[in-house]
Image (tube, rainbow, N blue to C red):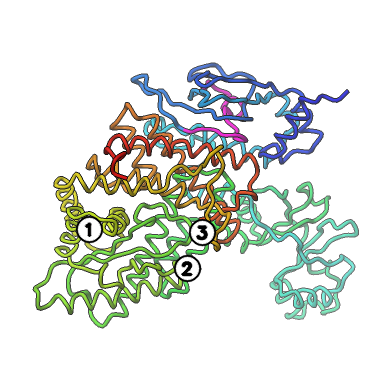
Amino acid sequence: MKNSIAERVNDFLKNYPPFNLLKNEDLLKISTQVSIIYLEKGDTLFKKGDSFNHHFYMVRNGGIALLHTTPNNIQEIINISDAGDVFGVRPLIAKEDYRLTAVANEESIVYGIPINIFETVTNNNAEVYKFLITAFATNSYDPYTAEETGKIFGDYLPNNSQDIVNFQTANYTKKPITCKISSSLKDAATKMSNNKIGCIIVVDDHKNPVGIITNSDIKNKIATGLFPIETPVSNIMNAPVITSKKDLTVADGQLQMIKHNIGHLCITKDGTVNSKLIGVLTHHDVLVTLGNNPSVILKEIKRAKRTKKLRVARLKAKTLIKSYLEQNIPLSHIVKLISQINDAVTIRAIEIALKKMPTPPPVPFSWMAIGSQGRKEQLLFTDQDNAIVFQDVDEDQYEDTQAYFLELAKLVTKSLNKIGFEYCEADMMASNIEWCKSISEWKSQFSSWILNPDDKAILLSSIFFDFNSVYGDKDLIEDLSNSIYNALDESALFFKFLGRDALKNPSPLGLFKQFVFEKNDEEKDLFNIKSRALMPLIDAARLLVLSKKIKGINNTSERFEKLAEIEPNNKELYESCSYAFKALSKFKTKQGLLHNNSGKFIKIESLSKEEQLKLKRCFKPISEIQETLKLRFDLKNFM
């Protein structure tokens, strides 16, 4: 008799890692033993300090908050696990007591996965183990422990970008060119020439690898006359070959190559010479993978002498983002790395442009990134938003000084466009005379926006309030920031205008909790995740930090986290907003990578029901933070 409950569990688990990596029969063995746990909002599944039990968990419905308890007995949200997320993996990986507390963030159903059954059916499955280590690292992140030990992920996931790349599965050639052991060297060499490759694998009748021939062997053994060109391949091949399994990591592959002084590693079905050849990992493959390491990309950027080289380096960062998302590396870590790469690209573009200018800059200046780059939230290629502020000069020198920086900006924005950052349609770029000014002119501009607010002033100032100095004299930016905050003291009306602007996009859900779609012909029936979900959070965070005079924090999620710190009464709301922003940003980025665009417009019908539910869950903090803005800035009669 069929177990219908187990089948329903099975149907759910098979859609999510690591269970989608298992054979059907193995997954069914697990499904029959899964415990189904119902939790009301606020119910505790396990507490920090509890002895580990015999299960780890997956969320079926709802959300589970993982909380860190401070020495002052205050609980802080570290992560919220949604449907399909794995958590509570510490007993499986570390065999020690829980360091976090798991509490239902809403009404939830959780599957308890029995560890003994799971370990039995996943024995020696490296892909499953790698996923669980990553899940463990992501869910067990404890910033307080990190400060004490100097580690982010303990001993289970390396804490620097180089090690993260080494942890990846190596990319090898899946269909290697082979020849039979009975072949002549001439036949093998002809195959190598036709396929434009530097080596060929010699296999027996069972397709097992028995030797390898490289260009070097042909040069040293045939060109020198040691053997005739018609000699059997067995006379000159290197044997035996060194083999490995298909799931080896980059670090494993590199170590084997160093240990055996080889440049090619044969990948076989079971990892031994007595099984079928399925691929070849070369030293070049390892170098290419390592080339997507942030530190290597940054070195390439700093060495680049042409825009073309900068574009190649920045495209590698796109591959890096995809790889990190697939490994469940925390988004905050990804954002910091990519922001560093984006800034490095801009800096190098400016340095290259300065060399093309007829003279050095006439006065100190600073290149400002604004918009998403200024907030350090730019993951995919977007349009440019930038500006220049330069030191004050005498009135009779102003025009010539401004003309110099406008010419410099044209070179830089042209380079950034070639790299992949589109020109701003609204021309909010340093090459526009309106966005290339002296420090005094910029102070006057911001003062005008703040003291005489109108719709245009709010639109422009809201973009420029997220500026960040990328290159040049940072004192100019500090001076400008101080001037802005002094002006804010003189205008309460400005905050009302900013508040009204922050409410221009209400909840992304309409009546009956349905998604609100675009109505114009070009984007009809598409959901604009940027304007309807991300911008309301961006605008709210900006308004609140400005009203609190919080300087030096531009990133939206970090702004909410800082607000949670200084406003304990609203801590839960701000942390929810921070989490929602990161979840929405991650979703937008994944969509952009999937469709090779910005990810801004989403076809909701293409999403699974679980994905739609995850999106909707992120919308609740939007409506709550907007209600807070209405009350705090008295906006109900100012709409």
Instruction: Identify the mark nearer the N-term, 3 or 2.
Output: 2
Residue 294 is one of the magenta-drawn residues: no
Mark toward the viewer: 1 or 3: 3
Query: What's the mark number on residue 598?
Result: 3
- Contact, CB < 8 Å: mark 1 with mark 2? no
Q: Amino acid at mark 2?
A: Gly
Q: Amino acid at mark 3?
A: Ser
- Which segment did they paint magenta? 79-98
Question: Which residue occupies the extreme front position in the image?
Answer: 637
- Callout 2: few (<14), some (14-19), or many (20+) C-alpha neighbours within 10 Å? some
Above or below — where is 269 with respect to 618? below
How far across and down, in percent of the image, does residue 85 sit? 59, 35
Mark toward the viewer: 3 or 2: 3
Query: What's the mark number on residue 420?
Result: 2
- Secondary structure beneath disc 1? helix
How far across and down, in percent of the image, does residue 460 sit? 29, 59
Residue toward you, 585 or 192:
585
How far across and down, in percent of the image, does residue 590 sit? 56, 51
